[in-house]
Image: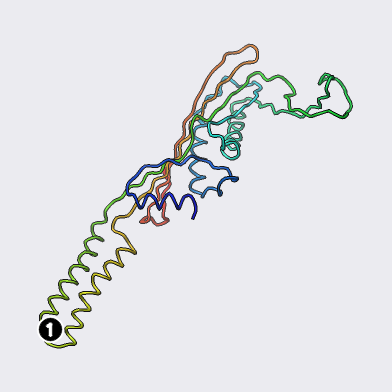
Amino acid sequence: MTRTGVVVLLLTLVGCKYSKETVPMTRAFDAVRVPNQQRLVALATEQAIEALDFKALAGKTVALEVSGVFPHSHVDLLDYLTAQLEAKLARAGARVLHPAPVLVVPGVAAEGAAPASEGATQALTLSQQADYRLLVGIAWGGIDTRDKVRTDEPLLTKQIGIGVGGLLGGIFLYALSDSAFRKNFSAGVAIAAPLGAFLWYRKKSPFPHTYTLIGRVRVVASGIPSGEGTAFTTEGKGQSQVILDEYAPEGYMVAR
């Protein structure tokens, strides 16, 4: 059973509860998230990025550094966040500088023309100094799961009516029967009606659960100038949700 299945099962057993599931899990620790979970995190991340204000970086070069509070989030969420950040910076008119490999030989300056030799290593360094150092961190990110139980009164009335009505009707007919066939038939009705109502209840509960998955992401970005310029901080929050309802035609409804 998947982690999602376990969460849903536990919620069903304990009734109306509130739980927290951190997102994302790396593929090394868990299976790929189901589409609705991926959708929640992606939409929330996009909203948070769009809320960031990078006007001060227009026409500037930027060294981008991304981090997160969850140790396991560097594989999935941070990679996606970095891609969205670079797109946002490009739209704002900034240019992100990417580190390039540089041969480093012990005892030789990096800019010197040195042939490869034993002990030489490669390091990543920016080809030029960026105008701004942009530190971006995910303050928090995850999926909240809410479980709400409601009562389908018409369905419950029908199930109770069949069960109780069939039982009482069978007993009444049994008392009035004057032959073995009628008594057996009446007893069968008294037994079959409650059993049928119970099976109907098990197949379609009159107390359906509505699960709401809410994805939330908060991103904080701090711009630090390398020379002249003004430091700034901007933040963005994003939220999206999916409502899992067994009565819905597709089984779920997306509410951004």
Q: How many marks?
A: 1
Residue at 32 percent of width and 55 percent of height = 208
For residue 170, side relative to residue 231 (left or right) = left
Q: Is residue 237 visible?
A: yes
Classify 10 Å Cα crowding around label 1: few (below 14), some (14-19), many (20 and above).
some
Residue at 64 percent of width and 23 percent of height = 62
Residue at 20 percent of width and 83 percent of height = 184
Residue that label 1 marks:
177
Q: Tell me if residue 110 comes above or below residue 144 in the rendering.
A: above
Q: Position of residue 58 (x, y in %)?
A: 61, 22
For residue 44, side relative to residue 60 (left or right) = left
229 or 63, which lies in front?
A: 63
Q: Position of residue 173 (x, y in %)?
A: 13, 79
Question: In the rendered image, which quarter is residue 178 located in?
Answer: bottom left
Residue at 50 percent of width and 40 percent of height = 23
Q: Quadrant of the C terminus?
A: top left
220 or 58, which lies in front?
A: 220
Q: Position of residue 235 (x, y in %)?
A: 49, 25
